[in-house]
Image: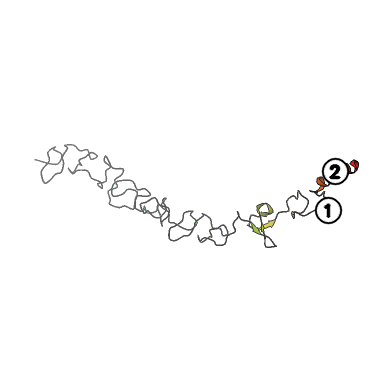
């Protein structure tokens, strides 16, 4: 009597019959070919949990679930959009994008510097702060002029203060003459030469 396991494939009844009772090879003990989803891991399969779910750790394609496969693994991933972009609503590590994560969400955030602080050019709501002082530019002084970098110090809070520094010229930085300071006399050499010429002329007379 023909039966499954006799080594002969019965047309219309069996899809295979390898004549053994090994249920882990390519032909099951029910004389059917192994397929993804039958619960037995075969060559080419990374897993086979016997179901068609794509939200557990084994996909319906019999491949292990991973971030970026396009399927959200329940309890493991917050999202999975199947790409490696950090500029959309789902980051490349399968976390939901949020202000402060260090990645600019296109169309939603103007900036994202990865912190929740204001006053650094990108505020805590991930919006660009306007009218931030340019640290490379000078700072207005009390007279309406501009103090250059070596004329002021900037504190950790961004506030600036005139820099007392060291007044090498002794003039307080004004460039003016200081009492007791020897002055340059650009005409003195010519006056001396004129005096010598006058003495020579008198002797000749």
Quadrant (top left/top right/bottom left/bottom right) for the N terminus: top left
Near mark 2 (Cα within 10 A), the count class, few <14, some 14-19 or many ≥20, is few
Looking at the picture, does residue 59 appear above or below residue 18?
A: below
Quadrant (top left/top right/bottom left/bottom right) for the C terminus: top right
Task: State the image coordinates of residue 92 (x, y, percent, origin top left).
Answer: 41, 51
Q: In the shown orientation, is residue 137 left or right of residue 107?
A: right
Between 200 and 4, the one lying in front of the other is 200
Q: Which mark is residue 179?
A: 1
Looking at the picture, does residue 139 appear above or below residue 185?
A: below
Question: At 89% across and 43% down in the image, what residue appears?
Answer: 199
Task: State the image coordinates of residue 101 (x, y, percent, origin top left).
Answer: 48, 54
Residue found farthest to the front: 205
User: If you read the primary sequence from the N terminus, does the residue marked by circle 2 or circle 1 appear first?
Assistant: 1
The residue that label 2 is drawn on is 197
Question: At 84% across and 45% down in the image, what residue appears?
Answer: 192
Between 29 and 34, the one lying in front of the other is 34
């Amino acid at each position: 009597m023909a039966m499954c396991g006799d080594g002969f494939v019965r047309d219309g009844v069996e899809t295979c019959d390898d004549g053994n009772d090994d249920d882990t090879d390519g032909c099951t003990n029910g004389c059917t070919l192994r397929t993804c989803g039958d619960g037995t891991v075969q060559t080419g399969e990374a897993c086979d949990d016997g179901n068609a779910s794509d939200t557990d750790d084994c996909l319906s394609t019999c491949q292990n679930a991973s971030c970026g496969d396009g399927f959200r693994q329940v309890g493991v991933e917050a999202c999975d959009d199947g790409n490696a972009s950090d500029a959309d609503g789902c980051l490349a590590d399968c976390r939901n994008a949020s202000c402060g994560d260090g990645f600019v969400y296109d169309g939603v955030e103007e900036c994202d510097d990865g912190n929740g602080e204001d006053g650094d050019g990108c505020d805590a709501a991930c919006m660009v702060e306007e009218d931030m002082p340019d640290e490379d530019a000078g700072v207005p002084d009390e007279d309406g002029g501009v103090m250059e970098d070596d004329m002021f110090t900037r504190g950790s809070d961004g506030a600036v203060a005139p820099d007392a520094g060291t007044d090498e010229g002794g003039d307080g930085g004004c460039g003016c003459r200081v009492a007791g300071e020897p002055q340059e006399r650009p005409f003195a050499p010519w006056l001396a030469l004129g005096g010598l010429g006058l003495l020579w002329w008198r002797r000749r007379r």
